């Protein structure tokens, strides 16, 4: 991790800076780039615009993570349920991403499970289109086992639940071996919570682990089981290898997706659409935009001008 990225993470975690930033209008240059809207209606408008203008799909994510206050948990769950209802009304995929630590897992697992089911029930439509999912994000290792267990429970209960797995984590091939036999959606990411003892380290090792996992996800067994692979990456080199792998193994482009963060590499998102691939954006919304947006700055120094403009705007 670079010094620049470490500084951005420290800024993201600073309670004082966070309070000051949250008080500012959500349409600062930084928020406007990486956040889809201050509330669910604005986020759905953004999703409609992307779908109509470019055929890009969206997964709505209400900003707020690692919450243990009961009122804040209830608020997060209500926002996720509201997002499902608003997406349905707008005729879009009912697709939301959820952090287990935002919906009760910081207090007790039973509460988190009950809340996940509530959101899952809001996702499920009478006529399943196969693109409606509640996808569980993967956070740090303290919650990894419980997130995988929750995914299994939701699937058994008939909830269209997807899961995110991190290529950098050494256990991922084992988790994948189970998942590819299910009718589920599996989003593969490089991983944003590096931990020395549990992970692959270094760009080359992580990229190779990503491709190894992609190869499992694009196996013939997975193709036959109704499994939906999702490649959550902005890395065009990896995407190129994946496209080739999919073509060789008989995966039609409609059977898998590339997913990127809203505002990150929009040029590449459009290029993939023009090539005929499914593209989804992970579309965050809500007032708590600062920690999320400043982490995006840390990922690429070229975004520093957005931070500078935000900090100097009135
Ligand atoms: P990189 O090698 O980091 O980047 C590839 C290229 O994209 C480089 O050119 C880079 O400069 C550019 N790029 C990357 N980020 C930015 C940016 N912010 N601005 C401009 N250019 C940029 N991680 C988790 O641990 N758990 C999750 O649940 C999770 N969910 C995710 C969901 C989605 C849809 C995505 C896209 C990512 C998610 N992540 C999650 C984050 C992920 O783990 C990586 O940290 C992040 O995507 C960066 O890796 P990359 O694959 O894009 O490759």
Image (cartoon, rainbow, N blue to C red):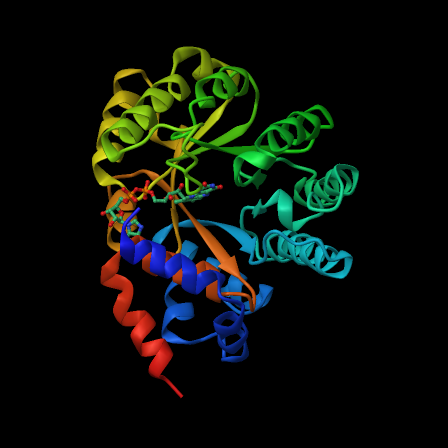
Q: Where is residue 178 drawn, in percent x and y?
A: 54, 16
Residue 282 location (% of width, % of height): 45, 50
Q: Nearer the viewer, residue 113 or 191?
A: 191
Q: Can residue 53 be seen in this snapshot? A: no
Q: Residue at x 27, y 27 (%)?
A: 205
Quick check: 224 left or right of 151? Answer: left
**The C terminus lies in which quarter of the figure?**
bottom left
The number of callouts visible is 0
Residue at 65%, 43% (x, y): give it.
Answer: 123
Left or right? Give the position of 217 relative to 105. left
176, above or below 40, in the image: above
Query: Is any part of residue 187 visible from this angle?
Result: yes
Q: Residue furthest top?
A: 221
For the point 59% across and 53% down, the residue is 65
Residue 302 at x, y percent in the picture: 22, 61
Q: Residue furthest bottom?
A: 314
Ligand 1 visible in quadrant: top left
Who's the residue at 38% across and 69% down the image?
30
Q: Quadrant of residue 166?
A: top left
Position above or below: 49 against 261: below
In front of the other: 95 or 77: 77
Residue 57 spot, x, y in % from top left: 44, 48
């Amino acid at each position: 991790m670079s010094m620049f990225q470490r500084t951005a993470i420290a800024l993201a975690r600073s309670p004082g800076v966070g309070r000051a930033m949250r008080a500012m209008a959500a349409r600062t240059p930084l928020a406007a780039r990486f956040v889809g809207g201050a509330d669910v209606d604005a986020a759905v408008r953004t999703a409609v615009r992307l779908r109509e203008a470019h055929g890009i799909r969206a997964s709505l994510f209400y900003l707020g993570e690692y919450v243990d206050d009961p009122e804040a948990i209830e608020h997060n769950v209500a926002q996720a349920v509201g997002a499902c209802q608003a997406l349905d009304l707008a005729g879009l995929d009912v697709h939301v991403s959820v952090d287990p630590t935002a919906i009760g897992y910081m207090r007790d697992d039973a509460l988190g499970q009950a809340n996940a089911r509530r959101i899952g029930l809001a996702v499920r439509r009478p006529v399943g289109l196969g693109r409606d999912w509640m996808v569980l994000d993967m956070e740090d290792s303290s919650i990894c086992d419980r997130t995988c267990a929750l995914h299994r429970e939701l699937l058994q209960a008939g909830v269209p639940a997807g899961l995110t797995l991190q290529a950098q984590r050494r256990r991922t091939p084992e988790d994948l071996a189970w998942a590819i036999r299910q009718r589920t959606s599996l989003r593969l990411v490089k991983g944003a919570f590096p931990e020395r003892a549990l992970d692959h380290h270094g760009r080359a090792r992580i990229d190779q682990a990503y491709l190894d996992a992609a190869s499992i996800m694009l196996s013939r067994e997975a193709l036959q089981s109704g499994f939906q692979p999702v490649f959550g990456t902005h890395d065009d080199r990896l995407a190129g290898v994946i496209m080739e792998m999919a073509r060789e193994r008989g995966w039609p482009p409609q059977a898998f997706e590339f997913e990127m963060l809203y505002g990150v590499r929009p040029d590449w998102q459009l290029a993939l659409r023009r090539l005929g691939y499914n593209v989804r954006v992970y579309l965050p919304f809500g007032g708590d935009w600062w920690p999320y947006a400043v982490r995006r700055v840390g990922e690429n120094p070229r975004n520093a001008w957005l931070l500078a403009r935000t900090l100097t705007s009135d």
